[in-house]
Image (cartoon, coloured by chain):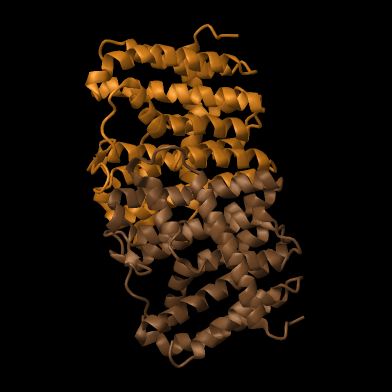
Chain colours: A orange, B brown
Amino acid sequence: MSPSRPDMNLNHWLEARRAEVEATLAARLAESPVGDDPGRLVEAMRYSLLSPGKRLRPLLGLAAAAAVTPTPDRHVLVACSAVELVHAYSLVHDDLPAMDDDDFRRGRPSNHKVFGEATAILAGDALLTLAFEWIAEAGLAAERPADFARASLALAKGAGAAGMVRGQARDLGEPAPRNVTELERLHGEKTAALFRAAAEVGGAAAGAARGELEALRTFGWAYGVAFQHVDDLDDADHPHLATEAKRRIGALIDEAVAAARSLPYAEKDLLVTLAEGLRERALKPSL
Amino acid sequence: MSPSRPDMNLNHWLEARRAEVEATLAARLAESPVGDDPGRLVEAMRYSLLSPGKRLRPLLGLAAAAAVTPTPDRHVLVACSAVELVHAYSLVHDDLPAMDDDDFRRGRPSNHKVFGEATAILAGDALLTLAFEWIAEAGLAAERPADFARASLALAKGAGAAGMVRGQARDLGEPAPRNVTELERLHGEKTAALFRAAAEVGGAAAGAARGELEALRTFGWAYGVAFQHVDDLDDADHPHLATEAKRRIGALIDEAVAAARSLPYAEKDLLVTLAEGLRERALKPSL
C-alpha cells in the first residue's frame, strides 16, 4: 500500500491540492462582493486570505477526505478551503494591538497596519462569517446537507469558545503553562482544535462514517499538538518545558499515525506521511 | 382572520415567545463551556448576550416561522435565538474603541469597559461562531439539515461582507449619506440585512417554500429599513434627510404588510401587526 517514495508522492499530491485551494480562495472571495468596496473591507479580507501560506488546514482536510472516500468532489474542496478563512480571521484578530500587537505577519505588515484597526476587526469578522456561508452553500449544492452540517458543527466547535478562541483567551488572560500538561491544553485549544476541525470538515463533507470521524478527530488533535510543539522548538518558546515537550512529539505522532492507519482507503498514507514529516522536522538539529 | 384586538394578542404572543428565547439563550450559553473560564471569556459572552434586550430579531424569526407552518418546533426556536448571538456580537464589536468607541450600551458599561478590549474582541468572535454551531446542531437534531443549511446560509449572507459588516465598514469608511437612496443603502446593510436574515432563518428552519421565503425576505428588508428610519427619528440622526425619510416609512411598511399578507397561515397577522406598530410609532408626535 505504501508508495515506494512516499514523500515524493505526497509532495506531488500536496502541490496539486494546494493549487486547487488557492484557486478556490481567490475565485470565491472575488465573487462574494459586488460593486464598490466601502471601507476597503474586501481588499482587507483578500490581503490576509490570499497572502502566501502553506494552506495546511485545508490540505489536512483534503487528505482526511481522501482517506475515507475514493472521490472527494469540488464541494469537499470548498468546505476544506473554508477552514482557511477561519485561520486567516484568527491571524488578523490575533495581531490587533489589543491582542498580540504584531506589526508583521508572514513578512508583510499586518492587516491593521495597512487598513486600520476598525477595518481589520471587520475583515476578520467577515472572513469568519464567510466560512459558514461557504459550507452551507456547498452542502446544498452537493445535496448532502447533513454531511456538511456535521462539517459546519465541527468547525464552529473547533473555532469557538470551547476551542481556538478559548485558547487565545487563556493565553492572554492566564499565567504561562507550568508543566507539559498545561502546555498541551493551551496548544490543544489554540492550535489543535482547528487542525482537528479541519480533519473533521474534510471527513464529514466526504461522508465519513462515525468511527472514521473519530479516528480523524484523534489524528487532527495529536497532529495539531505535535505541530505546535515543533513550532515552539523553532521559536524557542517555553524553553523550560522544551526537553519534555520534545519527548512528547514522538508519542503524539505515534498516536496520529495509528489513527490514520485505521482508515479505509490507501490515501490514508497521505496522513501518515504528513505526520512522519513532522517527526523528521523535530529530529533535525537545525530547524 | 384578524383578531379583534390584534395588539393585545400580539403582545401576549410576543411575551410568551420572548420568554422562550431568553430561556434558550441563558440555558444554551451556560451549557457550552465546561469547567474554568480562562480570560473571563464566557462571562463576557453572557454579559452581552443576556443583558436586557427586546430580542426583536428572534421574535421576527419566530413570527415568520408561525406564518409558514402550524407547528414551529424547539429547533426553530434555537435557530431563531442564534440570530440574537449575531446581534450581540455586532454590538460588542461596534462599541470597541477602534470602531464607535462607546462606553455604554443599554445603560450598562460596554463589554470592553468591563472585560478589556482583548476579551471583548474574543467574546464577539465566539458569539458569532456559536450562532452557526447552534443552527448546525439544530438542523441535525431536527433531521432537516437542508432547511437549516438554508437558514445558516441566510444568516451568514446577512451578517457578513455583503450585509451587516459591509454596512459597518461603509459607515466608518465613507462620507455620510447625501440623499435618502444612500441612507437606505446604509440602513439596509447595517440593519435590514440582519432583520431579513432573521425572517429567513425562521422561515427556512420552519420549511418555508421558495415563494414564501421570498415574501419573508421582502418583509424583513422593508421592515428593517423602516425600523432604522424610525430609530433615526428618535435619535435625530441624519436631520437633513428626516422629512423625506419619514415619508418613506409609510411606503416601506405598506410593502412589508403586503408581503406578509401573501403568507399561508393566519399567524401572518403577527408580522402585519409588528409592521403596523412601527407605523404608529413613527406617527407619534413625541417618540
Residue A287 seen anywhere in this rendered image of the structure: no
Answer above or below: position of A176 versus A269.
below
Q: Nearer the viewer, residue B50 or A148?
A: B50
At x 46%, y 76%, the residue is B228
- Residue A35 found in image quarter: bottom left
Q: Position of residue A222 (x, y in %)?
A: 46, 21
Count of numbered labels shown in the rendering: 0
Q: Nearer the viewer, residue A242 or A5?
A: A242
Q: Nearer the viewer, residue B76 or A69?
A: B76
Q: Position of residue A54 (x, y in %)?
A: 40, 30
Q: Residue furthest top?
A: A4
Q: Is residue A145 left or right of residue A124?
A: right
Q: Position of residue B253 (x, y in %)?
A: 58, 82
Answer above or below: position of A211 versus B98.
above
Residue B269 seen anywhere in this rendered image of the structure: yes
Question: Image quadrant for the C terminus of chain B?
Answer: bottom left
At x 48%, y 47%, the residue is B129
Question: Image quadrant for the N terminus of chain B?
Answer: bottom right
At x 50%, y 75%, the residue is B225
Q: Residue furthest bottom?
A: B285
Q: Is residue B92 left or right of residue B54?
A: left
Answer above or below: position of A12 versus B25.
above
Q: Position of residue A118 (x, y in %)?
A: 31, 57
